[in-house]
Structure formats: structure tokens, C-alpha cells
Amino acid sequence: MILAVGATGQLGSLITRRLLAERQQVRILAREGSSWQTLGQAGAQVAIGDLKSRATLDAACAGVDVVITTANAAQRGGADNTQTVDTDGNRNLIDAARNAGVKQFIFVSAFGVTADSPVPLFQAKARTEEYLRACGLPYTILAPDAFMDVWIPMVVLGPFLEDRPVTIIGEGRRQHSMIAADDVESFAIAAIGHPEAMNRHLPLGGPEAVSWRDVIAALERRTGRSIPVVSLAPGQPLPGLPEIIGHLMAGLDAYDSLIDMPATAKAFGVTQTSVDQFLRGILSSASQTQTLRNSPT
């Protein structure tokens, strides 16, 4: 039995649906009022619970061999925050899994997190990594770099499709190993029971490191259009985006994150998605959506 935590989120949903498609026994942890019905109808067992409630986690972990968690409080609010969910909640889940005799705990963290990061979510992930390593559970920590699915639409494709300039912080020439969510899903599935995943911290990136200028150039090649770019100094707000995005963009402009992936991809049998392939797929989806909107009803 595999327990998926965070199964109603973007990445968690991808992982859960893939497991169900492969006829795995899957249980999902779902909060009261969350949208778990579709996954339940697809065959997942549903355990109503919350990372903030240890008793519900003990029940959810009963009889479970593997836990995969992608849960975080990044898009929540109120009582759900980085302390209650990403720090205390993850510790509750780890403790429940240990007490239930879980054979592998797969935690989706992020590349380069540190306990002194200026980003609270990254601090919490670093603390969870440390706690997981020390707790005695067999573990796998997946540490993906920036997600193509989040950053490219937000920074480049959104403005492009709205005929606005693309706004970046700095020169946009720092190289980062952006990775597609589909690839992280594939690594998470492949890590289950894999000997090279046991008690390992696995940095995950795409097949090539790219800069914002590289992404923009790839989009220009694919669309045949010139894209105007506005460069802002660190500290200036990005138009139409939350303040935290500007801070994160400024951070990305301060360093390179280069992850050598060929050996890892080969070991886990994952064929990776390039930025050009990602752009082709998302532009095709956008085109199909526009066609449907313009069709007569």
C-alpha cells in the first residue's frame, strides 16, 4: 500500500494518477472539504486527515509500505502555514510512518534548500530533510530544481500570450536546471523500492541548464516572433505577480544551479523533457484551448 500525501495538488495528483494507472494500491490523505472525489472514483482509498492532526496520520499510515509526500502550505493560508504544515506537519507524518513500520518515506523537497534560507518554505524543507535523515526511517529525498510548469508560464508564456513584454530581474543569464513536473513524477514513481534511491538525497534537474534568455530565445524560435524583454533591478516589483516572486527571481539571478542528470536519468529509466519540448506541448495546449473558445456553440 502506498500513501500519497498532497495528492490533490499539481505534482501529487500526477503521481497519484500514475500509480492508479499502474494498478498500485493507493491511499490518499485528504483534508475535510478538499477535492479528493475524482481520485476516490479512480480507485484510491481515502483517509480523511490533516498533517496538523497526528491521530489522523497514525490511521492513514496503518498498513502502508511507502509514503510519498508532496504536501506544502505554499498556496494555503490561515492555520496552514510553513510552521504548522511544512515543519510540524511533516514531523507528525514522519513519526506516524516510523511507528507504522513504513519501509520507504519519499519526501519531495527542493534543490539547494538550507535552514538559513531567507525563504520560510525552504527553511522548513531543510529542517524536514534533517529530521527525516535522523529518524531511522528508510528514506528518499527528491530535490527538484525550479519547475518549468510553474516558472515558464508565469514569467515568460503569460506575458507573451497577452502581448506584453517579458519582465525579468537582472540580465537573466544565470543558468538553472529547470525540470518538468512530469519528470519529477517519473522519478518519484521510479524511486519506489529502487535500491539506488534508498537513504539518498537526489538532486533533480532537466536535461540541460537554461537561463531566462535561453527560454525566451527558444520561444522566439518556436513561434517566429520577437519578444521584448524588460530587465528590472533586484527589489523592484514584477508587474502582476506577488511580491515574493520578485524576491525569488532576484535570488535566481544571484547564482547558477547546474545539476548533472544523465547518470541519474539512466539509473531510474527516466526520459527527460527539454525546455523546447515543454514549450511545444504547452503552446499546443494553449492553441487547442483557444480553438475551443472560438468554436461556435
Image (cartoon, rainbow, N blue to C red):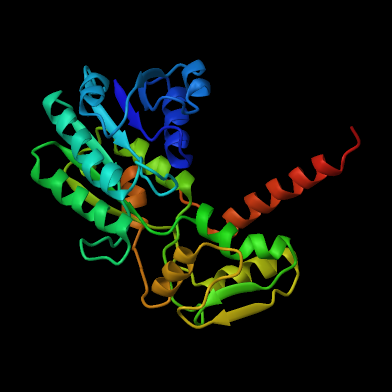
**Does 226 sit above or below residue 205?**
below
152 or 140, nearer to the observer: 152
Whether residue 83 is situated above or below residue 40 in the rendered picture:
below
Left or right for 57, reference 182: left
Pick whichever, 186 or 37, lies toward us.
37
Tell me residue 33's x, y (percent).
46, 26
State the quadrant of the C terminus: top right
Nearer to me, 42 or 208: 42
Residue 223 place in picture, x, y as percent: 73, 64
Where's residue 106, x and y in %? 26, 39
Residue drawn at x 31%, y 49% is 82
Provide residue 153's location: percent of width, then percent of height.
59, 57
- Is 154 placed left or right of 101 in the picture? right
- Answer yes or no: is residue 213 visible: no
Answer left or right for 294 relative to 97.
Answer: right
Is residue 49 something one can see in this rendering? yes
Quarter containing the N terminus: top left
Q: Give the image quarter of residue 116.
A: bottom left
Q: Residue at x 44, y 59 (%)?
A: 207
267 or 223: which is nearer to us? 223
Q: Residue furthest right?
A: 296
